[in-house]
Amino acid sequence: MHAFEYVVPKTVREAVKSLEEKGDQARPIAGGTDIIVQMRVGRRRPIRVVDVKQIPDLNELSIGPRAGLRLGAAVPCYRVYQNQAVAEAYPGLIDAASMIGSIQIQGRASVGGNLCNAAPSGDCIPALIVLNATAVIAGPNGTRELPVEEFCIGPGRNALQPGELLVSLRLPLPRRKSGAHYLRFIPRNEMDIAVVGVGASVTLDGRGEHFTTARVSLASVAPTPLLVTGVEELVAGQPLTEEVFERVAELARRQARPISDMRGTIEQRRHLVGVLTKRALRTAIQRAREA
Amino acid sequence: MTTQKTIVHITINGDETDLLCEPRQSLLEVVRDVLGLTGSKEGCGDGNCGACTMLVDGRIVDSCLVLAVEVNGSTITTVEGLATPAGLHPLQQVFLEEAALQCGICTPGFLIAAKALLDQEPHPSEHRVRHWLAGNLCRCTGYDKIIRAVLKAADVMAPSQAHHH
C-alpha cells in the first residue's frame, strides 16, 4: 500500500478542515472495508486518510419522536441491527445492514460508508432510498442536506465535494400502516454482491386494504442505485392485488438499465427486477399490516 | 505529517505492547511481521476469506482490513491466545478430534470466529453456526467437519444445555 498521512479529528469541524486542506487527495475512513481494499490495489491513492470514527456526530444512533432515526455515518452495521428500537421501526434497513459482507465486515462497515462508496450494488442504498433517507453533509460552507437518491452520481462516485463529509443519515419515523423490505438475488447464501437488489416501502390505508403510497428502488441494474419513478402515482388508492404488483414490477423492469457481466446477463437481471419487486412489495405489505 | 511511524498501544493475548507503525500497515501485517505472531494468515487481503480473523475489543474483524493505527488502545486476541499452559482450547481440541482441518491455513480464523460466537451464544443452532462462519472460507474440508466441530465444542464448553437445532 502507498504511504499516506493518517489523522484522527475529534469534531466535524476539524474533519472538514482536514479534508479541505487536501481536496480530492483526502479521503475519510470509517470501517475501512472498502477504502482499504481500494488503496491496497491502487484504485484510490489518497495522501491523507481522515479517520472519522472518533467524532461523536458520526457515532450517533438514536430515534426521536420528531426527528426520526439519526444514523451517524460511521456507525457500524452491527450496532444498527443489534439496536432493538431501530430493528423494530426500520426492518427494511436491517435487511440490508445484516446482509452486507460477513460478521467480520459488519463489525466495521457502516451504512454511511456503504452509501459513500456508491457501488451500484450497495445493499443499504435502496433500503435508504425507499425509507426516504436524507444525507446530512458538512462542508467548508456549512451543512447541507441531500435526498439519498441524489447522493450517488456514478459507479464509485458520490455527490460530496472536496472538503465535504457525510455526517449522518436521517430517516423519518415510519408512518402508520407502513412497512419496507430489501432483498437481493445472489447465487450463494451469503457473502456475495447483488446480481439484482430491490427495496420497497409501502404505506396502506387505515384498513390495510389499499395502497396509500409506495416506493421502489433498485440496485445493480444501473450506474447507481435507482429510485423507480411513477410508483407513487401508480399505486395510490389501488388494491393490494397481484395485478397491481405486476404493474409496479413492469415499471421497475422498464426503468432498469442493466449490463451483462460476470454476475448476470441483461435478460436475467431484468427478469429478476420483476420477480424481486413483487416479493419486496409482498413482504413490505405484510410488515405494514403487522406494524 | 504523520506518514511517519506512530506508537500504537495494544493488549494482545493478554500482553501489553507498544508498536511503531506506519499508517499504511494493516493490523495483520504488524501482528505477523513485527510481533512475529504468524498464526493469523493472509488469504485474500480483501475481506472475503476470514483467514486473518482476530478479536478486537470483543468483536471479530478481518485484520487485513484494519489499519494498525486504528486499534490504538484496543484489546486483541489471535489464535496464539487460545491455548493455555494447561492445554489446548476446547475448540482447538475438538477441531483435532473431528479432523476439521486439512491444510490449516483457514483454521486460525475459524477458531477465533467460532470462539467469538460460543462466548456470546453457548448453544447456537447449526444454521446459526453456518451463518456466523460465512465469512471464513475453507477450500479443503467442505465445511461439514468444521461445523460439526464447533457444535461439539459448544457441548464440551457448556454441557448443561441441549442444542436448539
Image (cartoon, coloured by chain):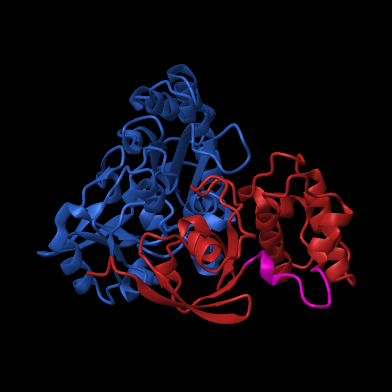
Tell me, what hue is chain B?
red
Q: Position of residue A156 (x, y in %)?
A: 31, 42
What residue is drawn where x is 83% and y is 51%? B148
Please say if A160 is above or below A120.
below
Q: Main secondary structure of the magenta part?
A: loop
Whether residue B165 appears in this view of the structure is no
What residue is drawn where x is 28% and y is 65%? B3
Query: Nearest the camera: A88 or A146?
Result: A146
Magenta stretch in the rendered image: B78-88
What residue is drawn where x is 52% and y is 62%? B33
Q: Position of residue A130 (x, y in %)?
A: 38, 46
What residue is drawn where x is 32% and y is 67%? A52
Q: What is the residue that sits farthest to the bottom in this orientation? A: B16
Q: Please state if A40 lies on the left or on the right of B164 as rendered.
A: left
Please say if A55 is above or below B53.
below
Q: Position of residue A187 (x, y in %)?
A: 59, 31
Q: Position of residue B68 (x, y in %)?
A: 44, 66
Query: Nearest the camera: B64 or A99?
Result: B64
Q: Please state if A118 lies on the left or on the right of B141 as rendered.
A: left
Whether residue A180 appears in this view of the structure is yes
Res A21 → quadrant: bottom left
Q: What is the residue that sits farthest to the top in this orientation? A: A267
Please say if A38 is above or below A91.
above
* Residue A46 part of the magenta segment: no
Chain identity for the colour blue used in the image: A
Res B111 → quadrant: bottom right
Query: Nearest the camera: A28 or A279?
Result: A28
Total residue callouts: 0
Please say if B160 is above or below B43.
below
Query: Nearest the camera: A232 or B74?
Result: B74
